[in-house]
Image (spheres, coloured by chain):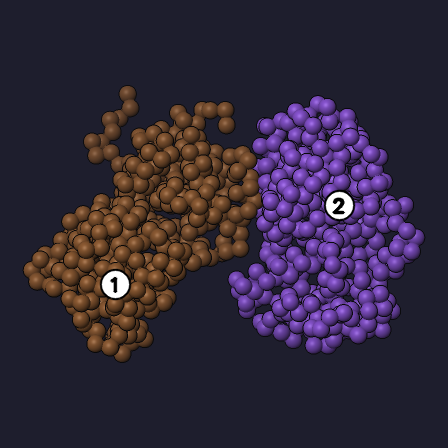
């Protein structure tokens, strides 16, 4: 069988800071590269496509794949895709959309990754315009797609509930081996500038109500005096959001950090606390586990049974989890064990292989019966 | 009453988990040890052998690199999460990945934690104690890791009594838990069929040279190449038909070597052929008039043994484990004594009955170093570690 030629809608790679979907695209590319290194004949051939680039050559070329740069800027390109004004080129075997932004696939089969349907579950957390776009994009995806990829069973259920055929949905988790090696020096320097020198608890999150940061801070406030020392809670996230959390003694805002610093912060933290109310997958816990750090988390698809689970609606439950995982060596050892095992299950190479299987399935289904 | 055991009791089978990570990536001396030891162990009827590699990206590669019949770990063992976890707690145990085994052998200074299995760790040398300023962070952690592993019940394997004594003296390890087991001789690739017209190219020698003194090894301070280069001036004067061939990449401290070459009256007869593959290196070794091995510190020393096995006379400095390894099969001079080194090289090039005798002793000596003997010594060590293990692992861990 000749190599599968896949058009990957890669608009997220245009962003300077990789969000959740950006991390997914980067991880997928990393895993596909590893497949190609291990067995070039079986690895798919990729064509990356995205909106107009400010630079020549297109920075996407650095990934080492063929690049189709659109003449349209980002927002216009997505709108043109939405309205079916642009079709996929005919020289590919399949189109993969890494989010709900899809295009008319033309003759090629289309596979769409749906990360969550949270705008339906918690509509208040989304602006009305965002909700409308998500609903429209979902309807188009249901119309256009041959198969779906989702990161967790719960998303598969939501998607089936929205009308997708459950048999056409494949659950593939996210990987955990995308962070660069920890830069302990940079992390320590960053912490020192914030006045943090000894052990600390870590929280990673963006400004969204569902991340539940206010309750986490309150829980921390109730156990701070019970910790063996004045261990601060270091919160990493885009600057500005922190003002929305009530100022609390011991809570330190680290702002945004580089991937190397983040890796170093994970590695040097006493624990990661990650207690969103709801999440399609939940990447930070597996990132922490991949550098040997125990995790306190709400029930999430990402954690397996490897985190210390707390009820995100219950401040006392979060507080108990923080105190126990910060101080109880037996609990910590058990969590480090489970976390290491969990992160070994989540390699981007294996996740890329599972994507390739879905792609081959989708192409195979389009082949006329008897024509083989 | 249980039946009496027969007088020639066959040992119970022993299952061994062996860290084969050094077989991945660029070839090293530690990789040579792993290949040889795995080969020797795999040929023993009383050993059930599993190999594992602490590596994510290349775990598929390990299966093709271990001898036939050696099982490989089924679960992936990515390095970063496991090393990160292992620095915090002795979890996850290696049995999680390779299944239940009686003993786990860390082949490269580090041995992973185990649930019940006894642990053995190989300490190849203590370069880290000698040159700490030039070691990277993972290497600097070795002494602490070795001490901790021993405190947790691990046994130490060294390739020589010399390193065993160093481990006891430098790291304060109980001598009863340190065992020297010599490596075997790494086999040289056989002569290429039809070698004369074959693909392996002979190293071109300078005008007027018909033979060469050979030195093998990375250019680094513990190989005293500047001394060899200075001594070669006298050798070159006595033997105008002889070149000096230095095979080995640049390590560090290469400036002193370059200075010595530049200052040498015989610099036109010093050749560095650059990287040679195994076949070319084997041919170069077989064709040498004499091997010079001017090492000041060595945990074992493969090249002199390989030369002795190939019938090439060896002149070495008595550094580190070299005297213990070469025995009476090489001529030894004191480290730093350039006149003695030059004198020995000249005599080796003179030839005659004394050199024939040296070559014969070298062949005899090297024949005593087999991977079968290495495997036998390791199995004895494994059995001692297993016999003691249950008593050791009653601590709170």
Q: Judge left or right: residue B289 versus residue A4.
A: left
Place of residue A176 in the rendered image (x, y in percent of width and height, measured from the top left): 63, 49
Per the image, the residue denoted by label 2 is A255
Residue B380 horizontal side relative to residue A350, left or right: left
Labels 1 and 2 positioned on one and the same chain: no
The chain in purple: A
Q: What is the quadrant of residue A2 in the picture?
A: bottom right
Query: Is there CB contact under 8 Å for labels 1 and 2?
Result: no
Q: Residue at x 32, y 66 (%)?
A: B262
Residue B214, label in figure: 1
Q: Does residue A249 sit above or below A283 in this rendering?
A: above
Q: Is residue B35 visible?
A: no
Picture coordinates of residue B112, whole percent (x, y): 46, 40
Which residue of the protein is positioned furthest toward the left in this rendering?
Answer: B353
The chain drawn in brown is B
Measuring from the top left, give residue B82's x and y in whole percent: 54, 43
Identified at 75% across, 37% down, the residue is A252
SS state under label 2: strand
Q: Residue furthest bottom?
A: B197
Q: Residues within 10 Å of mark 1 (few under 14, many from 20)?
A: many
Q: Nearer the viewer, residue B365 or A260?
A: A260
């Amino acid at each position: 069988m000749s190599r599968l030629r896949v058009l990957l809608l890669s608009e997220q790679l245009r962003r300077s800071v990789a969000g959740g979907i950006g991390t997914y695209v980067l991880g997928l590319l990393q895993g596909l590269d590893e497949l190609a290194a291990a067995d070039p004949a079986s690895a798919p051939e990729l064509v990356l496509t995205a909106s107009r680039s400010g630079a020549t050559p297109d920075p996407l070329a650095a990934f080492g794949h063929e690049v189709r740069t659109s003449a349209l800027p980002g927002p216009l390109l997505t709108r043109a895709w939405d309205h079916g004004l642009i079709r996929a080129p005919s020289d590919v075997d399949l189109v993969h959309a890494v989010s709900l932004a899809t295009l008319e696939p033309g003759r090629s089969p289309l596979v769409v990754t749906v990360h969550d349907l949270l705008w339906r579950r918690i509509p208040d957390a989304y602006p009305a315009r965002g909700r409308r776009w998500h609903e429209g994009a979902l309807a188009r995806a249901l119309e256009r797609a041959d198969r779906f990829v989702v990161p967790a069973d719960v998303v598969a259920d939501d998607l089936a509930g929205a009308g997708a055929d459950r048999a056409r949905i494949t659950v593939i988790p996210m990987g955990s081996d995308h962070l660069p090696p920890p830069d302990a020096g940079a992390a320590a320097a960053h912490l020192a500038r914030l006045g943090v020198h000894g052990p600390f608890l870590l929280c990673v999150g963006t400004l969204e109500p569902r991340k539940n940061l206010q309750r986490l801070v309150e829980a921390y406030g109730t156990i701070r005096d019970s910790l063996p020392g004045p261990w601060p809670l270091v919160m990493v996230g885009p600057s500005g959001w922190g003002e929305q959390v009530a100022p609390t003694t011991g809570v330190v805002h680290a702002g945004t950090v580089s991937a190397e610093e983040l890796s170093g912060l994970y590695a040097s933290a006493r624990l990661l606390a990650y207690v969103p109310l709801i999440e399609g997958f939940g990447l930070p816990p597996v990132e922490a586990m991949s550098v040997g750090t125990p995790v306190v988390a709400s029930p999430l698809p990402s954690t397996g049974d490897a985190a210390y689970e707390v009820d995100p609606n219950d401040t006392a439950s979060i507080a108990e989890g923080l105190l126990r995982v910060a101080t109880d060596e037996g609990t910590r050892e058990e969590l480090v064990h489970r976390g290491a095992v969990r992160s070994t299950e989540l390699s981007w190479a294996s996740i890329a292989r599972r994507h390739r299987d879905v792609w081959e399935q989708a192409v195979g289904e389009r082949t006329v019966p008897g024509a083989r | 009453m249980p039946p009496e055991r027969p007088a020639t009791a066959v040992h119970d089978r022993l299952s061994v988990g062996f860290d084969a990570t050094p077989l991945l990536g660029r070839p090293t001396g530690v990789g040579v040890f792993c290949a040889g030891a795995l080969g020797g162990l795999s040929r023993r009827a009383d050993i059930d052998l599993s190999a594992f590699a602490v590596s994510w990206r290349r775990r598929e590669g390990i299966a093709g690199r271990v001898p036939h019949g050696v099982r490989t770990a089924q679960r992936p063992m990515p390095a970063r999460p496991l090393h990160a976890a292992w620095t915090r707690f002795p979890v996850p145990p290696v049995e999680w990945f390779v299944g239940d085994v009686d003993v786990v052998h860390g082949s490269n200074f580090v041995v992973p934690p185990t649930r019940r299995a006894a642990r053995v760790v190989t300490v190849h040398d203590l370069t880290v104690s000698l040159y700490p300023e030039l070691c990277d962070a993972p290497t600097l952690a070795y002494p602490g890791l070795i001490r901790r592993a021993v405190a947790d019940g691990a046994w130490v394997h060294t390739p020589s009594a010399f390193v065993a004594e160093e481990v006891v003296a430098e790291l304060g390890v109980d001598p009863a838990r340190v065992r020297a087991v010599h490596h075997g001789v790494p086999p040289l690739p056989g002569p290429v069929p039809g070698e004369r017209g074959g693909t392996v190219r002979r190293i071109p020698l300078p005008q007027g040279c018909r033979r060469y003194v050979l030195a093998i090894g990375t250019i680094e301070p513990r190989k005293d190449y500047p001394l060899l280069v200075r001594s070669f001036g006298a050798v070159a004067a006595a033997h105008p038909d002889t070149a000096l061939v230095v095979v080995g990449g640049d390590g560090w401290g290469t400036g002193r070597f370059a200075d010595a070459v530049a200052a040498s009256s015989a610099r036109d007869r010093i050749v560095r052929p650059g990287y040679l593959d195994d076949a070319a290196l084997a041919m170069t070794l077989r064709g040498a008039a004499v091997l010079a091995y001017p090492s000041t510190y060595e945990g074992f020393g493969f090249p002199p043994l390989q030369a002795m096995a190939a019938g090439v006379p060896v002149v070495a400095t008595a550094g580190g484990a070299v005297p213990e390894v070469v025995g009476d099969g090489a001529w030894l001079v004191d480290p730093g004594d350039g006149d003695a080194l030059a004198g020995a090289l000249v005599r080796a090039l003179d030839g005659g009955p004394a050199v024939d005798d040296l070559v014969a002793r070298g062949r005899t000596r090297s024949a005593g170093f087999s991977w079968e003997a290495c495997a036998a010594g390791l199995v004895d060590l494994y059995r001692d570690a297993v016999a003691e293990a249950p008593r050791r692992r009653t601590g709170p861990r």
